[in-house]
Amino acid sequence: MITKKITNLQLAALYKFTRKHFVEYYDVQTELVDHLANDIEQIWKEQPNLSFDEAKGISFKKFGVFGFMDVVESRTKAMSKKYYKIMFSILKDFFRLPQIMVTLTIFASIFGLLEVFPLYQEYTIIIIFLLYIIVIGIRLFGLYKIKKNRLKESGKKWLFEDIILNAGGLGVAISTPIHFIHFSDVEYEMYYKVLLSAFLTVFLIINYIIAYIIPSKMTELLEEQYPEYKMLD
């Protein structure tokens, strides 16, 4: 007895099926389509008289009440973990030669501002964050345009690409209120300035990494993650 095999037309139908069930990323769709296709062929071995739609329905029920959502959530967590691993790897370089000189320059500049304007530390911090919001806001808009253009050109969304072009959720950081405690005790004033300068330095470097450095390496990272990306891009 000849076992039925999935046809190219049926594969296309499976892609459409995953999109219909709210799976928007091509790489996750491909993973699910491969799983469904293999499972359907296995079902046909046991029940050869079933139609494609009947076998597909049996296979889909195995995903449970939430359908493909658990798979999407699992892949999103995995790609986010990979993203932040890359981010922290780059961050470490800013504390080694020669990048540490950039880090020390940023730290010294912020500390110097707090020293020069001791009576206006809160205003100094506000100005720093306003400049940060303007620069990062412009960059996020630029990344949004890149994402929109790439989707228009390829017609495909990739999960890791989406995370990169969303700057790891940087938009949330912009709207997050950060409150700084000002120590009135002179004994702690220097410690406060050092800690605050260190915090702002790391904060700005991290945002620079996820908004500029990682997106600049996007093609390389995506080709490493998805072997087929170079052909489809």
Image: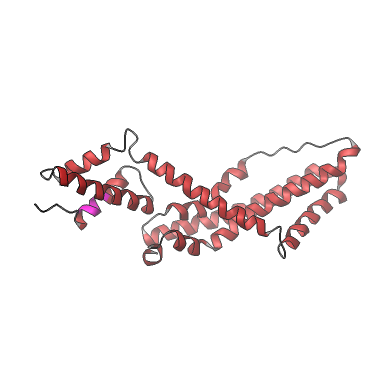
Kindly give the residue lying farthest to the left in the view shown.
1
| Whole-percent x, y for residue 2 in the image | 11, 54
Kindly give the residue lying farthest to the top in the view shown.
65
Residue sitting at 66 percent across and 59 percent down? 93
Is 23 included in the stretch rendered in magenta?
no
Residue sitting at 20 percent across and 49 percent down? 41
Magenta extent: 10-14
**Lateral position of residue 152 relative to residue 115, left or right:** left
Residue 212 falls in which quadrant of the image?
Answer: bottom right
Q: Which SS type dominates the magenta stretch?
A: helix
- Using the image as rendered, state which of residue 195 and residue 2 is in the foreground: 2
| Whole-percent x, y for residue 65 in the image | 32, 32
| Whole-percent x, y for residue 70 in the image | 39, 39
- Using the image as rendered, state which of residue 135 and residue 44 is in the foreground: 44
**Lateral position of residue 231 relative to residue 126, left or right:** left
Quarter of the image for the C terminus: give it.
Answer: bottom left
Residue 138 visible to an observer of this rendering: no
Colouring convention used in this rendered image of the protein? secondary structure
| Whole-percent x, y for residue 128 in the image | 73, 50
**Lateral position of residue 74 relative to residue 122, left or right:** left
Residue sitting at 66 percent across and 38 percent down? 177
Is 13 included in the stretch rendered in magenta?
yes
Kindly give the residue lying farthest to the right in the view shown.
186
In this figure, what is the number of numbered marks?
0
Residue 176 visible to an observer of this rendering: yes
58 above or below 99? above
